[in-house]
Amino acid sequence: MNLLCLKKSAISLILIIFPICIDAQTVEKKIYQTDLAVTAPEIDGLMNDSCWNQVEWSGDFIQSEPYDNKPPTQQTEFKMLYDNDNLYVYIRAYDKEVDKISRIMSRRDNLSGDQVQVIIDSYYDQQTAFAFTVNASGVKADEAGSRDGNNWDSSWNPVWYVKTSMNDKGWCAEMKIPYSQLRFGKKDEQIWGIQVRRYIYRLDELSAWQFIPKGSPGTIHLYGELHGINQISPRRQVELLPYLVAKTETFEKEAGNPFKDGSLNALNVGIDGKIAINNDLTLDLSINPDFGQVEADPSEVNLTAFETYFSEQRPLFVEGKNIYQFRPSNTIVINKFQSDNLFYSRRIGSSPHGYPSLSGGEYVDMPQSSKILGAMKLSGKTKKGLSIGILESVTANEKAEIDHGGVRREESVEPLTNYFVGRLQQDINKGETVIGGMITAVNRDIENPALDFLHTSAYTGGIDFQHNWNDRTWYVAGNMEFSNVRGSEQSIIRTQRSSARYYQRPDAGYVSLDSSRTSLSGYGGTFKLGRSSDKRIQFETSLTLRSPGLEFNDIGYMQYADMIHHGSWMAFYWRNPFSIFNNFYLNTNYWMYWNYGGELVSAHTNMNFNSQFKNRWHMNGNFTRTSKTLSSSLLRGGPSFISPGGEEFNFNFSSDDSKKVSFNVGTYQSFGDHKSFRYNEYWMGLDARPIDALLLSFQPDFMINNRKLQYVSTTAKQGDPRYLFARLDQKTFSFTLRVNYTINPELSVEYYCQPFVSAGEYTHFNKITDPRAGEFEDRYHLFSDREISYNAGNKLYSIDEDLDGVSDYSVSNPDFNFRQFRSNLVVRWEYMPGSTLYLVWSQGRTSNGSNGIFDYGSDMSDLFGRTPHNVFLLKFSYWLPF
């Protein structure tokens, strides 16, 4: 949560057979008695209204950070009132050193400095809550909590009102929270769960009205209670947010290309809406959404067989995302499945899968993304504890426009597609037990035969549960999921040959490529048992299955099928200050993989730690040992290869981020047995805040990647496959610069830029000969100078295996230079509650080369010598409540 994130870490189980049963600490719940306001107070932060005299102050806060269950260094108290439409809260934060109160200015939901927070469990289901936070400068943040406080969604953006003020005794905050932004049942007398918290920035001190011990397995069920709200009715929320977008693009003009004349102008309109179906369910809808203000993904060079996972940043899909989460392998142990999810919203509106076939003299205008025609989300939670999430979205039949001498045609590059997600979760016994299920569906209307490599339909589903006992200190949880994809023979062949499973592997006797199939199904499941409490020791052990046919990449994200995983962790926490530390934890893990043929794929052991010193500096690191690995992906569909094991470690060190200037440094080092690979990465970060309203951030990163066996290509000699590899020497340097200037809580200017340069040189070409040989050097053959030659004119390496003077096969020079610059300048003005004006300037530059030599000065000169692609955008939205 914004006020303080208590970082949970993964740790492994060594002594699971010796569990320690210690009950969670029992804490008496506090009660606050409110009253009906005779007149509504004016929200000015000054408390000049006489209505506040109707209720008593409540205080006696208890510290939870850095010390647990000790008196705070500064006192805090609050009052609460209500009327037929709103809840009112006044918080007085006393401070003996008023001049040291931190009043950092920032954008909404990005709080820093001194803060106070009110959390409301208006359902009183002891599982969900709404948090309203403000800092001493009046900057707001808000979150929706679920899973008993173990999951907080900061994308939730309700409309509420707050003002802060300073005086010689400290600072104050006055809030007005409309009932339309909360969810509660229709009752004569309401009882809500509440928590009030305060964070003192300079002391890194967190205190709360209702004391909750550190490490408690859930927090919302432990909140205090708000009594005295009578005869209020739930409000049906209806909000519309129409918007207008004007956009201008400038780019390099290309002679003869009618689609690249140097500029492009567009005008777009759309509407977002939020409609309360009843007090439990809310319908969010969007017609023709626009995401022009969203920051671009970071640059990368991906040399693996797997797709990179990028986080979602588009508001339509970020808000309320928690209900749509279904992680098939939701374990804390570090593993190959940690990003997997049945629903990966980046699939909706992604880049088109197809590309038109062009002949000489043809130019193409290719859409950059699939246009989202509309999207709808129905979500909420009933008073009986049933959480509901339904998402429906349709993307357009995207067509590339092709010009040949003024004659134009269109070709579909992405079919009209419907996406559906349905999620249910039922709380039983105030969340002691939770059961749920999820289904997804993707249906495509493919009109272009060239797109037959896509599935016409894809379905996934699953059920999950978690049961807690012994004051929620023990839990057992699990899930099961299935998938079914359908389409042409071509599409199912493509799925069978994908990097997640590689059915064509010649040594995988338990699977085989079937070219006649028009569907593929799979299943998976996870079971875990663990202990979480406010005491020192926690652990978990788990087992996960993934059948070879499991596939949910049409709407979800996964890298690996055909896998059995077992892992365990054990954690040791020192939560209160001791010696030189404020806190310290140590954890240890092990995890292992097998394939469905029963072969051990790999085994891993890990130990890691995280700590904070009493001066608020941090240090963390980890060490991992990996056994030799039976890789089914290294040869990209060839036989499995025994890769040498290795060690890896990383270390991070950071200074006190409450200072005007702070820094962090870190490194990641990885070493392969038999000198098979070496990976070195170094990074740092420097933050400077010369004034409360301005934050400057600089984060450079340098990486060196050396591998004896880097995949180059698969070819054949007289029908026999040849898996070609080479030694890779790659260097990458990038840095990220951010400048955030917040003029006031409603008006901010943010600038982001990232130059990225990477170069890779391939040498010592070789072919795989015996992928399972006992010795690493016997698994490949290094080509001699007589066997391999290079033609600089056509940039081809030719291989003559039998030395008869005739090339047996050739491969293009894989050396690369990739350079990219991305930047984003956003001026955001919330000119009235819920209504926003954006001014955006985005710039991109990209260049490529093939000499493989890393020369940062030359690379940057080449990059900034290119004509940039600029996008200037004005977005205006207006909030219409009904």
Image: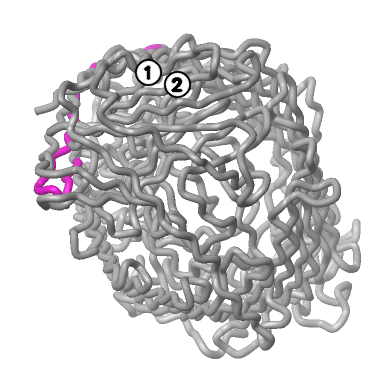
Does residue 314 sit above or below 531 in this rendering? above
The one nearer the camera, 625 or 358, is 625
What secondary structure predominates along the stretch shown in magenta?
strand
Instruction: Name the amino acid type tagged 2.
Output: Cys
Q: For the magenta stretch, what is the residue range?
A: 263-284
Query: Which x, y percent locates residue 359?
Result: 39, 38
Q: Residue, x 30% and y 23% (percent of image)? A: 161
Any magenta on residue 268?
yes
On the picture, is 665 further left or further right than 539? right
Disc 1, SS: strand
Q: How many marks?
A: 2
On the picture, is 426 further left or further right than 230? right
Which residue corresponds to mark 1?
Answer: 163
Query: Which x, y percent locates residue 688?
Result: 70, 19
Which residue corresponds to mark 2?
Answer: 172
Q: Residue, x 38% and y 78% (percent of image)? A: 480
Q: Residue, x 73% and y 43% (percent of image)? A: 815
Query: Which x, y percent locates residue 237?
Result: 14, 37
Any magenta on residue 823?
no
In which quadrant is the C terminus drawn? top left
